[in-house]
């Protein structure tokens, strides 16, 4: 990606992937600690930070990967191919369960998802970066956030009803998803990686690009801290009019999560890239094969739900109930232990890939 890798960026990318695996792989969804769940609708939990952090880091990677690239057909082709790969991998995961092994029931196949959103956001953000300087990118980001708020909050729906930010049919994000996607959504009434909410998700990536530019500055900690405070203050103030909400990726959500991402990055950058402290390298190894490890974790997890053992268990439930469920442990803690074990497994896998110099670029 670039000659001298920034340790803090690799660390944060790997840590983010590890946390994605943790929240996606509990022993049972009926027993999960609340910080490891998404907010029901409005609000923010630690889990809600994870996906925007990843898109934010995608933006930083775009800055360093393409800052010396030519604005050429070859570059665009590479960007398009990578985006299609990401979208295809995500669609495959959606298709794999519950339609495997026949792949013949597409009536409710979910079209979008985490990898699909990464692919779309990467494509649009990279193209914007190649064609506009940082001032225009900042202006585009601001325009999207303000326009998104005005559209969702003030434009009446086609049937004349007033718009809402709540989980209701007259929420514009939900309305458009229902109209375009129909049954091909995560829930019957909305999709957290839906059509309209992709626009502010692009802003999250653009902010990552802009922060990547700040990492080239000598006074990097000063500027990162200033940017973080600006994001956080503006985001929490904006929350008064446009509630923080991951499901519709509200403008305040973009600002607040970008603020936390910048602040945490500044802290890690100071420790690892300035002070040279050696800690958490295992997460760096995961970060260097982030998409591969995330995809494998999702694929293997889905496979474990498909494999039947006896008449009552899947491989997942059998391992969970046999190894992790004990009378002296709470249900939540047992479920957490299962998730942590999965994280340790994939972190170890990332280390093995690094030692064998296996780096798979999706």
Image (cartoon, grey):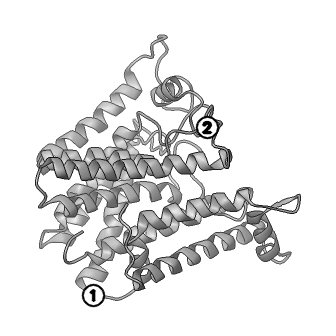
Image position of 164 with respect to 329: above or below: above
On screen, residue 42 versus residue 341, left or right, reads left
Along the line of sight, the residue nearer the viewer: 217 or 91: 91
Q: Is residue 30 visible?
A: yes
Which residue is painted at 17% across and 61% down in the image? 213
Label 1 crowding class (10 Å Cα cut-off): few <14, some 14-19, many 20+? Answer: few
Task: Give the image location of residue 165, x and y in percent.
Answer: 48, 31
Question: Which element is circle 2 on?
Answer: loop
On screen, residue 143 versus residue 152, left or right, reads left
Image position of 180 with respect to 89: above or below: above
Question: Which element is circle 1 on?
Answer: loop
Q: Which mark is residue 64?
A: none
Q: Mark 2 points at which residue?
A: 187
Q: Can residue 233 be seen in this view?
A: no
Q: Residue 276 carries which label?
A: 1
Task: Give the image location of residue 218, x and y in percent.
Answer: 12, 73
Which residue is painted at 50% across and 61% down in the image? 295
Image position of 340 with respect to 84: above or below: below
Task: Give the image location of residue 326, x and y in percent.
Answer: 83, 75
The quadrant holding residue 95 is top right
The first of marks 2 and 1 along the sequence is 2
Separation of marks 2 and 1 at Cα, in angstroms: 46 Å
Task: Give the image location of residue 246, x and y in percent.
Answer: 47, 46
Furthest toward the top, the residue is: 160
Quadrant position of the C terminus in the picture: bottom left
Q: Do the residues labelled 2 and 1 touch (CB within 8 Å)?
A: no
Label 2 crowding class (10 Å Cα cut-off): few <14, some 14-19, many 20+? Answer: few
Quadrant position of the N terminus in the picture: bottom left
Mark in front: 2 vs 1: 2
- Count of all numbered marks drawn on residues in the image: 2
Along the line of sight, the residue nearer the viewer: 159 or 3: 3
């Amino acid at each position: 990606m670039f000659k001298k890798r920034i340790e803090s960026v690799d660390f944060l990318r790997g840590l983010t992937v590890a946390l994605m695996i943790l929240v996606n792989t509990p022993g049972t969804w009926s027993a999960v600690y609340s910080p490891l769940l998404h907010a029901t609708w409005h609000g923010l939990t630690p889990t809600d930070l994870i996906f925007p952090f990843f898109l934010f880091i995608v933006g930083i990677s775009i800055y360093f990967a393409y800052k010396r690239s030519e604005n050429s057909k070859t570059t665009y082709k590479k960007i398009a191919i990578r985006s299609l790969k990401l979208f295809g991998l995500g669609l495959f995961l959606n298709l794999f369960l519950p339609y495997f092994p026949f792949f013949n029931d597409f009536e409710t196949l979910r079209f979008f998802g985490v990898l699909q959103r990464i692919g779309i956001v990467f494509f649009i953000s990279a193209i914007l970066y190649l064609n506009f300087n940082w001032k225009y990118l900042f202006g585009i980001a601001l325009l999207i956030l303000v326009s998104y708020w005005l559209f969702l909050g003030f434009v009446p729906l086609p049937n004349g009803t007033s718009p809402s930010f709540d989980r209701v049919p007259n929420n514009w994000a939900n309305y458009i998803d229902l109209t375009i996607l129909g049954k091909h959504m995560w829930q019957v009434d909305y999709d957290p990686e839906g059509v309209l909410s992709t626009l502010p998700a692009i802003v999250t990536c653009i902010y990552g690009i802009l922060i990547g530019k700040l990492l080239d500055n000598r006074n990097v900690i000063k500027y990162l801290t200033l940017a973080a405070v600006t994001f956080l203050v503006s985001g929490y103030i904006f929350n008064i009019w446009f509630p923080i909400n991951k499901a519709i990726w509200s403008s305040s959500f973009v600002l607040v999560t970008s603020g936390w991402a910048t602040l945490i990055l500044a802290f890690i950058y100071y420790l690892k890239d300035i002070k040279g402290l050696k800690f958490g390298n295992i997460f760096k190894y995961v970060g260097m094969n982030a998409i591969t490890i995330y995809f494998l974790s999702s694929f293997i997890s889905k496979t474990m739900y498909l494999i039947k053992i006896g008449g009552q268990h899947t491989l997942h439930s059998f391992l969970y109930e046999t190894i992790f469920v004990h009378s002296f442990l709470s249900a939540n803690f047992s479920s957490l232990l299962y998730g942590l074990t999965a994280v340790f497994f994939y972190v170890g896998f990332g280390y093995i890939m690094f030692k064998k110099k296996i780096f798979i670029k999706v």
